[in-house]
C-alpha cells in the first residue's frame, strides 16, 4: 500500500493555516490539526507531530517540512494576494482549501 501525504492550507490575510493529511488508496485522513502561523509556531508544532509518527519515513518528514517552510516564506511575501502565484502546488503535494484576504 502506498502512503502519500498532502499539506492542507488556509490562506488568510493575517495567518496561514496548515495541516497534514495522509492519503491511502485515494482516502484522505486528517493526520494533524490545523496550526495557524504566525499566531503559533506552526512549523515546530507540525514537526513535533510528524516526528511522533515513527512510521513516516525520514525522507518524507524532511520533504513535508521543507515544503511548509517554502509555503510560509511565500505567504510572507504574497499574503495579500488571493492566489498562490508562481507556487507549484501539485508537485509539492499542497492543497489550498480556503482563502480570505479582505
Image: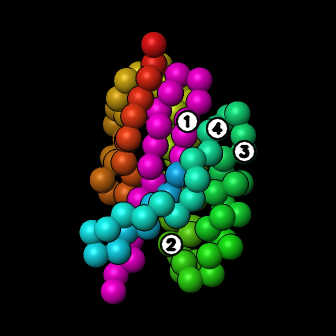
**Which is closer to the viewer, label 2 or label 1?**
1
Tell me if residue 76 comes above or below residue 88 in the rendering: above
Q: Which residue is mark 1?
A: 16
CA gap, disc 2 and disc 3: 21 Å
Identify the residue at the far top of this view. Answer: 102
Q: CA distance from mark 1 to mark 4?
A: 5 Å
Answer few, some or many: residues within 10 Å of disc 2's Cα (few below 14, many 20 plus, some between 14 and 19).
Answer: few
Up-down relation of residue 59 to residue 95 (above or below): below
Between the residue at mark 3 and the residue at mark 4, the CA separation in whole angstroms equals 6 Å
How packed is label 4: few (under 14 Cα within 10 Å), some, or many (20 or more)? some
Judging depth in this view, the residue of 63 and 17 nearest the camera is 17
Answer few, some or many: residues within 10 Å of disc 3's Cα (few below 14, many 20 plus, some between 14 and 19): few
Q: Which residue position is annotated with label 2?
A: 60
Say which of marks 4 and 2 sits in front.
4
Q: For the stretch drawn in magenta, what is the main secondary structure?
A: strand
Q: Which mark is residue 41?
A: 3
Q: Quadrant of the C terminus?
A: top left
Q: What residue would you read off at disc 4? A: 37
Colouring used for the render: rainbow
Alpha carbons under labels 4 and 2: distance apart: 22 Å
Q: Dot 2 lies on which element? A: helix
Amino acid at each position: 500500500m502506498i502512503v502519500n501525504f498532502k499539506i492542507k492550507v488556509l490562506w488568510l490575510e493575517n495567518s496561514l493555516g496548515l495541516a497534514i493529511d495522509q492519503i491511502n488508496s485515494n482516502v484522505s485522513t486528517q493526520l494533524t490539526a490545523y496550526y495557524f502561523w504566525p499566531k503559533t509556531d506552526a512549523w515546530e508544532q507540525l514537526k513535533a507531530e510528524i516526528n511522533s509518527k515513527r512510521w513516516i519515513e525520514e525522507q518524507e518528514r524532511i520533504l513535508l517540512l521543507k515544503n511548509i517552510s517554502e509555503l510560509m516564506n511565500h505567504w510572507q511575501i504574497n499574503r495579500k494576494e488571493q492566489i498562490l502565484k508562481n507556487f507549484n502546488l501539485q508537485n509539492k503535494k499542497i492543497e489550498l482549501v480556503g482563502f480570505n484576504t479582505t
